Image (cartoon, rainbow, N blue to C red):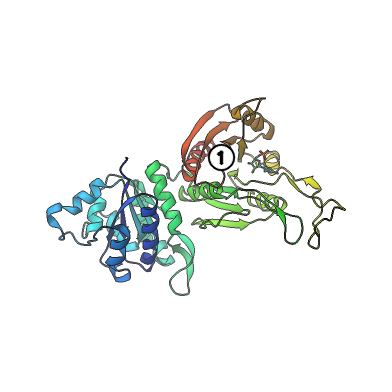
């Protein structure tokens, strides 16, 4: 039996501290062993009993509790990952300057594992030059400081500064455990477009032709790009109930024609576009105004017409230097294996990179994990080892970033 990854969850004193209980639950339920290190202020918002019950470990804030076991050194040394959520302006200031005035900041100094900060504060505090400088300093040292989400803050104000959704923090925490260097800031200043989910082609007011895409891979691509510094537009068709990625503009599209319109509008001036959406190849010739009655066969309610190939159009109409990435879910057959068909598709579609998934039971669709190959128009070919969809996303951006002009 392998030992579960050991995660230190630091909680600083902001109102978003209440969401750390949900994050803690997600981390423990997905097999992590978690010790919680709240600051004294965090315990003003959430009681120690909540963290103790959910983690199964006692919590302390100061360096003078349980002194014989030297927790301020051991906890950091033994961790595989430190996550601080929420990370307040004050906590980041203390961490940036190497303070060790409580158990959490002391542990941050002894930790040699990846460190993930999920900031939450008012927009003014996030945008203050002091906080900007502290964030820059922490990032320079290799700490992953997430972009916060935008939206409603405490009270009536809205803006950047919301804690990213706990599901998103958990996904990115898993990513850093899989691959500590998955979130460099190599897309800073870039604009990228990602499509996700499955389109639905309406037959009548209640029925549609759809597919099994959950949108998870596209969402993972969008959130990883945003956390690597890109300005991201996510064009989302129908998806499972997924957390909105922090710091990403989400545009909704229902059908293939709507998705085409939204993607073509979003790619103006973009550096790269990744078509992860499962776009219906066909749509009904006519949309029935009223619900189609049982047994009605005239005209054939399932008569179909071909949808435009958006990926091919993006390749044809691309702006100079714009990189186009496609996806292909393939199966092998008598005429060739998965990669043989994928190479032919890459040539046919003319895109720069093609992410290839082998489809079959439990693979690619509706699962949190993925694997496959990444083919380049330049003849390159790399294996995308099995792992989370965020891991696969990080490998795709690794290939995209150096190809951007
Ligand atoms: O040809 P196939 O459907 O297998 O190609 C898949 C790739 O093409 C995906 O990147 C998908 O987003 C894109 N696609 C598209 N428009 C369509 C069908 C697929 O852009 N009508």
- Position of the C terminus, as image quadrant, is top right
Q: How many marks?
A: 1
Residue that appears at 40% across and 61% down: 22
> Does residue 227 lie above or below 119 as drawn?
above
Direction from residue 25 to residue 74 in the image, left or right? left
Task: From the top left corner, tell me how far across and down residue 183 is, in percent.
Answer: 42, 45
Residue that appears at 44% across and 65% down: 123
**Mark 1: which secondary structure?**
loop
Q: Nearer the viewer, residue 202 or 226?
A: 202
Q: Residue furthest bottom?
A: 155
* Residue 147 visible to the viewer: no
Tell me which image quadrant ligand 1 sits in: top right
Residue matched to label 1 = 361
- Position of the N terminus, as image quadrant, is top left
Q: Nearer the viewer, residue 178 or 376?
A: 178
Q: Nearer the viewer, residue 335 or 268?
A: 335
Residue that appears at 57% across and 50% down: 215
- Label 1 crowding class (10 Å Cα cut-off): few <14, some 14-19, many 20+? few
């Amino acid at each position: 039996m392998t030992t579960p990854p050991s995660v230190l969850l630091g909680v600083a004193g902001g109102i978003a501290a209440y969401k750390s209980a949900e994050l803690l639950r997600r981390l423990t339920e997905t097999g992590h062993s978690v010790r919680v290190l709240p600051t004294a202020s965090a315990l003003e918002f959430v009681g120690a009993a909540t963290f103790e019950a959910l983690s199964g470990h006692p919590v302390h804030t100061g360096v003078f509790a349980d002194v014989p076991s030297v927790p301020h050194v051991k906890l950091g040394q033994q961790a595989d990952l430190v996550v601080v959520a929420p990370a307040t302006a004050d906590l980041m200031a203390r961490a940036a300057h190497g303070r060790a005035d409580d158990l959490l900041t002391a542990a941050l100094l002894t930790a040699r594992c990846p460190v993930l900060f999920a900031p939450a504060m008012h927009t003014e505090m996030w945008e203050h030059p002091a906080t900007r400088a502290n964030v820059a300093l922490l990032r320079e040292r290799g700490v992953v400081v997430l972009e916060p989400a935008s939206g409603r803050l405490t009270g009536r104000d809205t803006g950047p500064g919301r804690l990213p959704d706990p599901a998103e923090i958990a996904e990115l925490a898993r990513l850093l455990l899989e691959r500590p260097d998955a979130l460099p800031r190599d897309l800073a200043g870039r604009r990228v477009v990602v499509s996700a989910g499955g389109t639905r082609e309406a037959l009548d007011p209640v029925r549609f032709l759809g597919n099994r895409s959950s949108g998870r891979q596209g969402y993972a691509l969008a959130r990883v790009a945003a956390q690597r510094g890109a300005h991201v537009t996510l064009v989302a068709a129908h998806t499972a109930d997924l957390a909105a990625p922090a710091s990403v503009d989400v545009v909704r599209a229902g059908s293939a024609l709507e998705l085409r319109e939204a993607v073509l509008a979003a790619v103006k001036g973009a550096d790269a576009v990744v078509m992860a959406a499962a776009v219906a190849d066909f749509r009904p010739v006519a949309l029935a105004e009223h619900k189609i009655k049982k047994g009605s066969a005239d005209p054939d309610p399932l008569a179909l017409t071909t949808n435009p190939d958006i990926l091919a159009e993006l390749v044809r109409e691309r702006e100079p230097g714009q990189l186009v990435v496609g996806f292909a879910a393939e199966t092998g057959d008598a005429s060739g294996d998965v990669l043989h068909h994928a190479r032919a598709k890459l040539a046919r579609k003319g895109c720069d990179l093609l992410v290839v998934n082998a489809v079959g039971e439990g693979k690619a669709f509706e699962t949190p994990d993925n694997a496959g190959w990444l083919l380049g128009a330049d003849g390159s070919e790399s294996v995308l080892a099995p792992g989370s969809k965020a891991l696969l996303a990080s490998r795709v951006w690794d290939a995209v970033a150096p190809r951007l002009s």
